[in-house]
Image: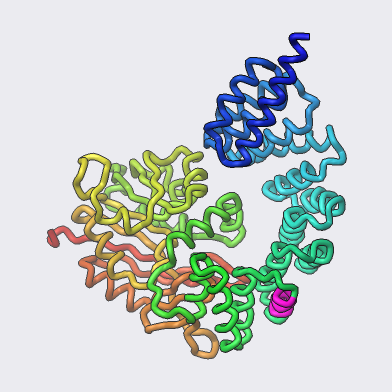
């Protein structure tokens, strides 16, 4: 009888802890779980919730221990397998996550969420046919689930069938007409495939349904603008601003369309939102685009007079380090310690997993360059013999302050190696975007710079130009993205 009461009390404590977690009161839930564990040491519910708490508190090691012990005690429990798959996915162990998700599906053939999770993981492993199969079963079980539909659409798109991807999203729209998420996903897919008329039609349907949000209107503005209907696009962007006046993503889209002139850089909040949501697939996507910048940086650094002779150069500041692709490319060169800076915490988590950085900081580029630095010597402006900025300055328009701050942060003789997208006219001789002749904010939300502007601004900042070469940075929409590979040196006599 005593064991029965203990079990009931443990269950009640766990239920209350679940309520507290749902309300965001993590600290209040912990002592309840500790008490429940004492009453029922082998409770699966306690172990599951403890693992969720540990994951939310950014202590995945604790969560892994909780789940390993729980699964060892109850290896046939599909929910625990699914939870560990999610945790392993978050920590980058995609193969381990896939094994757990597959086991969860085997243990419960009716669990659509487990099938969807397995499909997403298959997609991350590049197994698109398997991903389509898993996500199709999940979506068939719950046709109105926007998450399942979006995942299946991504899998179809990765398999090269954009028509099937759009059909998947439209089925979800029909099954759940009151949800805006699948509608926006369908509009975005049409924009990506440059079917702007279809995107406009879907956005207008969303508006008429009375569920359009700031994103719907922002995408409508993008589509209309791409069709040359700039007056109508301005109206759509105005609606987007009304619905999301403080949404950095919407504001940057509006600036890119020229409705808000004068923006000289992408907002930090916009960058954080974009790249945090992009972190898990960032590297896979860039590789698929033939991303060349890290390799070009490596080739440049091998020609550095000290590095070429095996002399170590450091510390090195890696601006906008992202997931650490540049650090990976130069890992065997005598450079370091590496200090990575990025505004997106999920990108930094990916970089940390590589184990290549001595320090990683969540900060804006301009808050680090030329500022007082907490690293030794404390309270002094930190100087670096090498600063790297791979595809970072494409989120800045005016570069005068940026180059001046970089110059101030370099030791005499130090190098700044960076890349920018080049401002070039289209086939009709028209330079796209609002331009002052030096730089322009393009419709994809990135800035492009003219070669003359980079040359003149670098010289004004006190740099000697070592290289200013036109290069292909990557491909987008089956076309090369032309940019400039820039190597600048702070000359020794400039003090």
Q: Is residue 164 visible?
A: no
x%, y% of residue 38? Answer: 63, 15
The front one of 405 and 288 is 405
Q: Quadrant of residue 20?
A: top right
Q: Quadrant of the N terminus?
A: top right
Q: Is residue 444 above or below residue 277?
A: below
Q: Is residue 328 left or right of residue 183?
A: left
> What residue do we see at 49% from left, 88% from top?
430
The front one of 53 and 471 is 53
Q: Is residue 414 above or below residue 34?
A: below
Q: Is residue 139 above or below residue 475?
A: above
> What residue do we see at 52% from left, 84% from top?
426
Q: How many marks?
A: 0
Q: Is residue 341 above or below residue 250?
A: above
Q: Is residue 133 visible?
A: yes
Write down the region rendered in magenta. 198-208
The kind of secondary structure the magenta stretch mainly shows is helix
x%, y% of residue 349? Answer: 50, 43
x%, y% of residue 280? Answer: 59, 49
Q: Quadrant of the C terminus?
A: bottom left
x%, y% of residue 325? Answer: 48, 50
């Amino acid at each position: 009888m005593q064991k029965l009461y203990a079990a009931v009390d443990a269950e009640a404590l766990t239920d209350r802890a679940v309520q507290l977690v749902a309300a965001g009161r993590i600290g209040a839930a912990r002592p309840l779980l500790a008490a429940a564990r004492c009453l029922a040491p082998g409770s699966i519910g306690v172990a599951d919730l403890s693992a969720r708490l540990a994951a939310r508190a950014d202590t995945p090691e604790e969560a892994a221990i909780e789940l390993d012990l729980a699964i060892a005690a109850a290896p046939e429990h599909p929910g625990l397998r699914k939870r560990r798959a999610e945790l392993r996915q978050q920590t980058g162990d995609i193969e381990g996550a896939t094994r757990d998700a597959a086991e969860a599906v085997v243990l419960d053939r009716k669990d659509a969420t487990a099938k969807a999770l397995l499909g997403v993981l298959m997609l991350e492993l590049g197994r698109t046919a398997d991903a389509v199969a898993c996500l199709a079963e999940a979506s068939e079980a719950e046709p109105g689930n926007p998450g399942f539909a979006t995942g299946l659409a991504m899998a179809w798109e990765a398999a090269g069938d954009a028509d099937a991807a759009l059909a998947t999203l439209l089925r979800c729209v029909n099954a759940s007409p009151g949800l805006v998420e699948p509608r926006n996903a369908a509009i975005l897919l049409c924009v990506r495939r440059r079917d702007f008329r279809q995107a406009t039609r879907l956005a207008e349907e969303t508006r008429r349904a009375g569920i359009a949000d700031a994103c719907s209107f922002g995408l409508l503005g993008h589509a209309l603008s791409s069709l040359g209907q700039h007056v109508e696009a301005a109206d759509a962007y105005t609606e987007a601003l009304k619905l999301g006046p403080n949404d950095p993503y919407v504001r940057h889209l509006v600036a890119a369309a020229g409705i808000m002139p004068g923006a000289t850089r992408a907002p930090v909040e916009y960058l954080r939102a974009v790249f945090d949501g992009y972190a898990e697939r960032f590297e896979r996507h860039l590789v698929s685009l033939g991303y060349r910048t890290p390799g070009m940086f490596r080739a440049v650094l091998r020609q550095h007079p000290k590095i070429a002779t095996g002399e170590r150069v450091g510390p090195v500041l890696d601006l906008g380090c992202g997931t650490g692709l540049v650090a990976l490319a130069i890992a065997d060169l005598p450079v370091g310690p590496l200090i990575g800076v990025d505004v997106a915490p999920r990108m930094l988590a990916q970089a940390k997993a590589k184990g290549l950085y001595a320090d990683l900081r969540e900060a804006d580029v301009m808050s680090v360059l030329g500022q007082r630095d907490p690293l030794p010597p404390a309270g002094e402006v930190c100087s670096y013999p090498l600063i790297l900025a791979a595809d970072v300055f494409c989120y800045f328009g005016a570069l005068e302050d940026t180059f001046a701050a970089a110059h101030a942060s370099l030791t005499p003789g130090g190098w700044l190696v960076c890349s920018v997208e080049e401002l070039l006219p289209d086939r009709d001789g028209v330079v796209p975007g609002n331009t002052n002749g030096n730089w322009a904010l393009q419709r994809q939300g990135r800035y492009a710079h003219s070669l003359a502007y980079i040359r003149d601004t670098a010289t004004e900042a006190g740099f000697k130009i070592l290289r200013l070469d036109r290069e292909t940075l990557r491909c987008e929409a089956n076309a090369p993205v032309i940019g400039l590979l820039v190597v600048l040196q702070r000359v020794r006599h400039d003090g």
